[in-house]
Image: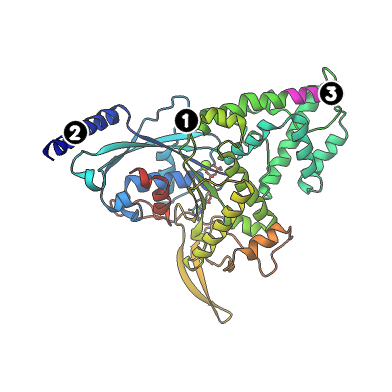
Amino acid sequence: MVISSLADTVLRQIETVQDTVNETLFEPVIRIGVTGLARSGKTVFITSLVANLLDRGRMPHLVAAAENRIEAAFLQPQPDDTVPRFDFETHLSQLTARAPVWPDSTRAVSELRLSLRVQRAGLLAGLQGPRTIHVDIVDYPGEWLLDLALLDKSYAEWSGEVLGRLTGRPEAEDYLARLAETDPAAKLHEPDAKALAEQFATYLTAARDAGYYDCTPGRFLLPGDLAGSPVLTFAPMQGEGTGPRGSLLREMNRRYEAYKREVVRPFFRDHFARIDRQVVLVDALGAIHKGPRAVEDMRGAMADILGSFRPGGNAFLSQIFQGKRVEKILFAATKADHLHHSQHAKLTAIMEALLRGAADRARFAGAGTAAMAIASLRATTEDSVTHEGQKLDVVRGVLLDTGKAAAFYPGDLPQDPGHLLTPARAGAQSWLDQDYRVMNFAPSPLTLRPGDGPPHIRLDKAAQFLLGDRL
Ligand SMILES: Nc1nc2c(ncn2[C@@H]2O[C@H](COP(=O)(O)OP(=O)(O)OP(=O)(O)O)[C@@H](O)[C@H]2O)c(=O)[nH]1
Ligand SMILES: [Mg+2]
């Protein structure tokens, strides 16, 4: 008896020593990817999440914070020298200024490292000191994710699919007209290639603004420092084979392959493959406002995004992931402060139904997915008003365009998500029962108590889902 308990103790001591050594050498890093299409709320989400992890007064559902186990949180230089730093301080000072403004659009990958010194939970708490966990947050445009599908497609296949979708879309008329005047087999004349690519990029931007999510190549929407380079100067067209040598079609083929090689693959290899946990932000209310087609498109985009996280779903990805996988994926409907809380459960139910549909379509079976409705930064307060004899739960805020205070009622979301998703799937043109409205609110001026981060809705639950098990 004595011997075995002695041996136990020794063993445990050795384990403890090993743990300590391991951890000072390899402090754990959790890499969280934050993505979403343009204006979905990525920058505000990261800014508010980090601010609320630094000052944790409003994070009761982050268990480690509620248990007072987070001893310190601090920003550190990030580990990747070639990735721009997420400009946390500027964004936060804009959001918390006396006259607050929303941050400007961001157009590329950026990254921030937040380190947490955390006391262990449970039995080990007394035995060992706190440990440091690094949280690397990577912000990247969702448009870039959708390019994954290109890796498996030849130029001819991609062109065929894209042109098939374009037919009948008013946004595409100009591009299709120009294409009709172009002979793919003609000798390459650079101004023609450039004009086609520009016209196609104009179409993509209009299509995205109209709520279409199938807008590849993603880098055409956010060219950054690649603007004007040959890898972005191509467009879909169809002709005989790959076209005669020196022809426009042959060159389009070549540039498409160069785009995959020089733009798409490096992104997936250098950023995507290193992510442990992923947040996908979606402007679900915006899509519902735009109508059934936008909702259906959003479901398609969610399926495509989930598909890119499916282990073994893509040969190139399997190779760069090397058996590693993304552990958790959160789909969050942002800007839930546009709704009175009496409707939040309905928005969550819609998100959950969309996620289920997307998971079926992507044949994604992994555990570790969740759907939520959140607001990164609350810009409204709640109220009820009587309108035509009926009590309405509204939110009040200051309108972004006019600076006027207004009460806002977006419409009554259905109790059963099927009432939106079924007509969307069936290709309905508009909602049967009612319209849904959106408004853009200005951020409200804040007076924060010491220890409190900016006000939010369920950001702590999102943080618990993403990080909680590792703290
Ligand atoms: N009411 C409200 N509006 C929000 C919230 N988060 C974002 N918004 C609105 O959404 C807009 C876009 O938010 P960003 O965080 O800049 O979105 P983004 O995804 O970084 O956008 P890009 O950088 O352009 O891709 C903001 O300008 C706000 O108008 C929120 O929590 N509440
Ligand atoms: Mg941004």
Give left or right: position of 446 versus 126. Answer: right
| Residue on which disc 3 sits | 243
Tell me the kind of residue under disc 1.
Answer: Pro
Q: Does the residue labelled 2 lie within 8 Å of ligand 1?
A: no
Q: Which tag, 3 or 1, sits closer to the chain's start?
A: 1
Q: Nearer the viewer, mark 1 or mark 2?
A: 2
The image shows residue 468, relative to residue 427, as above or below, that is: above
**377 magenta-colored:** no
Q: Nearer the viewer, mark 3 or mark 2?
A: 2
Q: Give the range drawn in magenta.
A: 249-254
Whole-Å distance between the Cαs marked 1 and 2? Answer: 43 Å
Q: Where is residue 413 in the image (x, y as percent from the top left)?
A: 58, 66
Tell me the kind of residue under disc 2.
Answer: Gln
Residue at image coords 72%, 24%? 255
| Residue on which disc 1 sits | 84
Whole-Å distance between the Cαs marked 3 and 2? Answer: 71 Å
Callout 2 secondary element:
helix
Residue 436 appears in the rendering: no
Tell me the kind of residue under disc 3.
Answer: Gly
